[in-house]
Image (cartoon, rainbow, N blue to C red):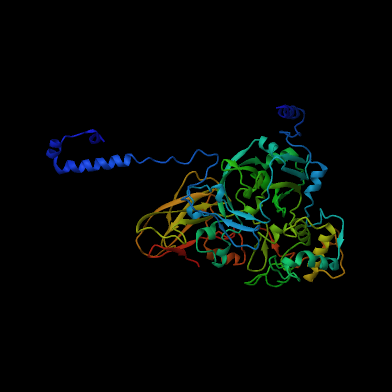
């Protein structure tokens, strides 16, 4: 900037020659740029929005009515292990009820000594716990049974999200009401129009179920059960009843429609497994995954998500040669039980076709099975609880497709 | 703070007392509002009854527009048929072929149907609708009256088709 202050006379200019003349031209340009004022940015605001350049959204699966159905998290665009609340997957059976927390109550009754009606203020006054947890719909990857999982990982695995949840341990409230010794189940009912209901074994409620009100640092979203939901860590999402209004302690499951005719697993022999609650260990590569294209040959970081409803992810192996060889991926810390765990592996794409897949191992020693192994035991009619290894096909031009379609 | 102090006092009075003393007993009105969840043994079923004939009329008025005039399905789920298909490559899971308990049908119709106006039906209307759907599937005769006594005794065709979770099952 120093030269802009110099005012050389004509002789000095001649002596300096062409090079200096060039710098004077540059100096004039700098003056011109400095004279262009910059606009101020957006004002300070009350509630943040993401950048308008970010366009990743949930995918809404076509359904019979707008109040039923599901939307899928764009896990191909996610980083880390948390899902923004605005992108958490949804599954509704009768729309999202508008509930005023000032009037909402949850009633704990049935086989208890002291039935209780609790306001949200009551709930929030109690000792709370916070856990980072994965939530997966029991029907996530349902299309994979018949190899109709969709072209991309959002459609094949997007009924999966990770959040930090805050709430009160259900065991604490069960101690408050005094559960009778002959009780063994809890019937949870939601405040949506269809009063969605599920039967939960008392043992799970005493172990780690939460009555959650907080999600990712704020009140949970209406679509996630605002103001209060049951949260059963590691279990199919449907059991984590949203808009919770009633917990009835009983000595039997109530065989609700959504645990007998739905969310039960039909086997090849025509029998059906009931109360298949836990989501077993599973993983999927999210980059490169179906529909994406590798930007260039050479180094790229391969990454994905692993989780287990039964414990911690201990190991994720990755193959880039269709399963002939497997190498350990790096696991991002912290590795929390029943939470999403991110894995990464540096990989060199050399323009050759590659079949890539990941395989998770959890702290129970359970190894994520192949699709073929799952089908050999359960057939193809199960719909729910699919956790097979997912294979993506990387083509020579760098485009990626669903290898099983 | 007063409540906390009361809770502390309670704790010293009795080990059986609640530790946190939050909330209050539900009011009779709150309990009425909860409605009734129905157990497979019939626990929770209210008074009232319904016939297949009454259910046929109610179905035509309230159910057929989504489930089809004969329960064959449309926007709403198919409600009939599918017997013998569960072990085939194209299983058809309906009330008749799949649902293990008739009480579940009462509970679900009562809590969730009609889809756009759940809670509309009186108990006797629910009994009637259930009777008609069971009759459509050939599970009960035309003259059986469905009520809190008879419904839990209706044996569904797939009642014994359900097993406990055996996982881990795949190695």
Name the image quarter holding the N terminus of chain A: top left
Residue A132 lies, with reference to residue B158, above or below; the image says: above
Tell me where residue A71 appears, x and y as whole percent: 58, 56
* Residue A404 is at least partly visible in this image: yes
Foreground: A26 or A78? A26
Tell me where residue A222 appears, x and y as whole percent: 63, 48
Tell me where residue B44 appears, x and y as whole percent: 81, 53
Q: Quadrant of residue A146?
A: bottom right
Left or right placement of residue A192 versus residue A1 in this view: right
Foreground: B156 or A49? A49
Q: Residue at x 71, y 33 (%)?
A: B20
* Residue B167 is at least partly visible in this image: no
Q: Which residue occupies the extreme front position in the image?
A: A10
Residue A26 lies, with reference to residue A386, above or below; the image says: above
Q: Quadrant of residue A215?
A: top right
Tell me where residue A333 appears, x and y as whole percent: 47, 44
Residue A323 lies, with reference to residue A17, above or below; the image says: below
């Amino acid at each position: 900037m120093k030269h802009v202050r110099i005012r050389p006379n004509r002789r000095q200019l001649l002596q300096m020659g062409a090079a200096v003349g060039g710098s004077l031209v540059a100096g004039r340009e700098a003056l011109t740029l400095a004279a262009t004022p910059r606009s101020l940015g957006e004002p300070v605001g009350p509630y943040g929005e993401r950048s308008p350049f970010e366009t990743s959204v949930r995918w809404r699966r076509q359904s019979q009515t707008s109040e039923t159905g599901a939307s899928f998290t764009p896990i191909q665009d996610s980083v880390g292990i948390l899902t923004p609340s605005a992108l958490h997957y949804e599954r509704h059976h009768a729309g999202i009820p508008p509930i005023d927390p000032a009037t909402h109550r949850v009633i704990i009754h049935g086989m208890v000594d002291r039935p209780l009606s609790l306001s949200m203020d009551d709930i929030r006054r109690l000792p709370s716990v916070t856990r980072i947890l994965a939530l997966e719909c029991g029907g996530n990857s349902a299309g994979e049974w018949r190899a109709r999982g969709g072209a991309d990982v959002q459609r094949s695995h997007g009924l999966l999200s990770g959040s930090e949840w805050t709430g009160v341990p259900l065991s604490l409230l069960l101690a408050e009401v005094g559960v009778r010794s002959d009780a063994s189940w809890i019937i949870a009912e939601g405040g949506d129009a269809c009063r969605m209901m599920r039967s939960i074994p008392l043992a799970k409620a005493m172990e780690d179920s939460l009555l959650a009100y907080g999600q990712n640092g704020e009140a949970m979203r209406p679509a996630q059960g605002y103001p209060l939901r049951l949260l059963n860590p590691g279990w199919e999402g449907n059991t984590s009843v949203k808009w919770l209004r009633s917990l009835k302690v009983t000595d039997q499951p109530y065989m609700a429609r959504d645990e007998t005719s739905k969310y039960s697993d039909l086997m090849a022999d025509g029998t059906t497994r009931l109360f298949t609650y836990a989501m077993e260990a599973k993983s999927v590569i999210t980059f490169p995954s179906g529909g994406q294209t590798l930007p260039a040959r050479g180094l790229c970081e391969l990454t994905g998500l692993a989780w287990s409803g039964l414990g911690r992810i201990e190991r994720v192996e990755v193959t880039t040669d269709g399963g002939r060889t497997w190498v350990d991926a790096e696991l991002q810390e912290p590795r929390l039980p029943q939470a999403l765990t991110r894995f990464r592996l540096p990989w060199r794409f050399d323009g050759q076709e590659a079949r890539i897949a990941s395989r998770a191992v959890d702290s129970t020693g359970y190894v994520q099975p192949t699709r073929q192994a799952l089908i050999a035991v359960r057939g193809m009619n199960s719909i729910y609880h699919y956790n097979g290894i997912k294979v993506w096909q990387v083509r020579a031009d760098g485009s990626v497709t669903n290898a099983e379609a | 703070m007063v409540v906390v102090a009361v809770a502390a006092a309670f704790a010293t009075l009795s080990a059986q007392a609640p530790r946190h003393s939050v909330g209050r007993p539900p009011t009779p009105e709150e309990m009425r509002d909860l409605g009734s969840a129905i157990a497979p043994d019939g626990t929770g079923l209210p008074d009232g009854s319904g016939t297949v004939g009454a259910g046929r009329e109610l179905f035509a008025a309230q159910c057929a527009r989504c489930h089809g005039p004969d329960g064959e399905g449309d926007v709403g789920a198919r409600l009939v048929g599918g017997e013998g298909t569960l072990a085939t490559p194209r299983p058809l899971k309906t009330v008749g072929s799949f649902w293990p308990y008739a009480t579940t049908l009462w509970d679900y119709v009562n809590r969730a149907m009609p889809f756009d106006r759940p809670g509309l039906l009186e108990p006797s209307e629910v009994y009637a609708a259930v009777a008609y759907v069971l009759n459509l599937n050939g599970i009960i005769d035309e003259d059986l009256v469905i009520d809190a006594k008879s419904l839990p005794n209706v044996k569904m065709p797939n009642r014994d088709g359900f097993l406990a979770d055996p996982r881990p099952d795949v190695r």
